[in-house]
Amino acid sequence: MKDEINFTKMNKEILDTENTNYFTKQKYLILSELSALKEDWKWSILVVMIAPICQLFFLSFFVNRSQADVLYYIISGSIVTSLVMGTMLTLGQELGVLKEVRGFDYYSVLPIKKISIIISIVTRATLSIIPSIIVMIIIGIVYFQMPFSFNVSLILVVVISGYSLSAVGAFIGMYARDSSQASLLTQIIQPIMIYLFPVFYPINVLPTFLRWISYISPTTYVSSALRKSFIGEFDSISLIILSIFCLLSIILVEKKFDWRGYGE
Amino acid sequence: MNDILSVEAVCYKYKNNEVEANHNISFRINKGEIVGLFGPNGAGKTTLVRQICGTLRVQKGIIQVNNKNISIQPKIISEVISSLNQTMYMHRFLKPVEYITHTGIYRGMKPEIAKKQALQLMEYFDLKNISNNLLMNLSGGERRVVGFLASIIGFRPFVVLDEPTNDIDPEKRACIWKMINHLKNSLGMSFLLVTHNITEAEEVVDRVVVLNHGNIIVQGKPQELLKTNEINKKIVFTLPYYENIKCETLSNLMNLKVKNIDSERFYFYSHNLNVEDNIKLLYSNLNGIKIKDIQIIEPSLQDIYIQIMKEKINNEG
């Protein structure tokens, strides 16, 4: 062992400096999450890429590929699948794992906000989806000859979508007992949000009651905003609604997510 | 009030359990005090720790940290307490220095200071050789040391350590006890130590609280417990090897259970008040056999703990 440590001097160093702010803590929480992506990036990307790409090719056999509108629906729909799998499901399962391994025992004695943990997980998840989105757009343009005009709103849609879907993921994580129950819940919610709401088809083909329900699903607006961005348009209404979903996620997590008593 | 922690009539019952995990627990920890929380597996120690750290609700009773009720002002927990949990959650892909640094930053330290101090703490434990390994590739003991250092960084006034020395080699265990003592003396930090390693904890604890089946069965300073619980002393004596005396012979002569350590050294336990009489009896019964050496060994904290638990089991029938 080394020489004695001067704890008094070390403590003075801490007391003499101001506390770090919220954003610095958030940055390091994200860096901690990204460490997993750094080491395991191939698998993280593959997991959210394979299913949507297979789905994209599968659907392309049943549709008229010469119609641009149809291509927009199947490509945006596949990207939404990737986003739902990558963010919402990842968040739900991660929170389930944290419950299972008593990870909140570590966080509960630290002066950090619950939403900061959610943001760090969603940021990692969103970053792991980006390659999949790029690949799907390239497949759309090169293979299916989808007319495409790049718009900055595409980046905005991808970023906001991840966080807006986190409310559902947080809800799953909050009520699931552990990671396996979170996984079951996500497998129930995922097909509803992707296949029962207007993601792969226009809203007017839905029965009236589903049409109304679909208005409260973020996937409806993510899909719409993505399609508009492919043709170079900015779907401000969808982006505003998605931002409201983000805000709701923050309120839900801060007010309802009680890590005290999660093990009861 | 000089309490850093006050636990008053605290109970806890898990959802599907009929029996309370903790029942009417009350004790206090003064500022700058180290309290050992001992008890067999399933005694309710970790449940109590999780209540203090805010991950389990205080269903009945009051827990106050720095005179503030944690159920009303939960923020006080992160301002005053740091902890090392039994399960030790860590981001597996971080390096030890990153994990300790990040924990310091979450406690409000500036990144550069947190990193500098994380390295200083690691150096104290000679952890340079593992500094570039990922946490997932460390041994259980190494991870435990890293977890301990993460619980220390930022120097919160009150540290809760649940099994801090599990799986750790003797040299580093000694270093942990030394560091705890040093932190108490230099910064006046308080500790709640949950451990089964009572022999080593004895070096640092000021007071002990013993839990069994969710109830406090005894609490106090080790010296007080020694007095009130009439703990037996151990008498060790050495006889010449050529005498070739058996334990059974000695037991019959002394009318006490005598055991041997090796072919020369024997021991028996004597009640505190009868030590002198028993030694006289030993000399007189040995019929001229010369005793080479005799030692009276004071009971350790572990002896006290074992005796208390034995009495408890006997009383429960």
Image: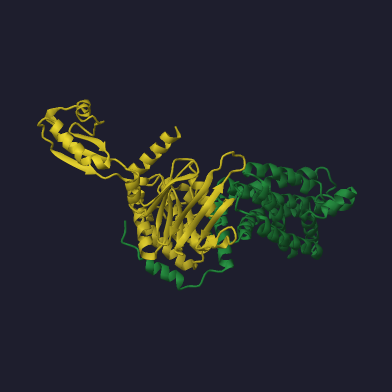
In the picture shown, does residue A26 fall above or below B200? below
Taking A110 as reference, is A138 left or right?
A: right
User: The chain shown in yellow is which?
Assistant: B
Colour mode?
by chain
Above or below residue A254? Residue B266 is above
The reply to whether residue A67 is in sight is no
Tell me which residue sits at (55%, 50%) in the image. A103
- Taking depth in this image into account, of B179 and A135 the one nearest to the observer is B179
Q: Nearer the viewer, residue B62 or A185?
A: B62
Which colour represents chain A? green
Quadrant in which the C terminus of chain B appears: top left
**Residue B174 x, y percent position in the rendering:** 33, 51
Residue that appears at 71% across and 51% down: A84
User: Which of the pair B258/A142 is nearer the observer?
Assistant: B258
Count of marks placed on residues: 0
Query: x, y (%) of residue A239?
Result: 77, 63
> Can residue B180 be seen by looking at this rendering?
yes
Residue drawn where x is 76% and y is 55% of the image: A141
- Quarter of the image where one finds residue B274: top left
**How far across and how far down the image is residue A230, in percent?**
78, 59
Question: Position of B105 compared to B220: left or right?
Answer: right
Please name whichever residue, B106 or B261, is drawn nearer the observer in this view of the structure.
B261
Residue B24 x/y as whole percent? 52, 48
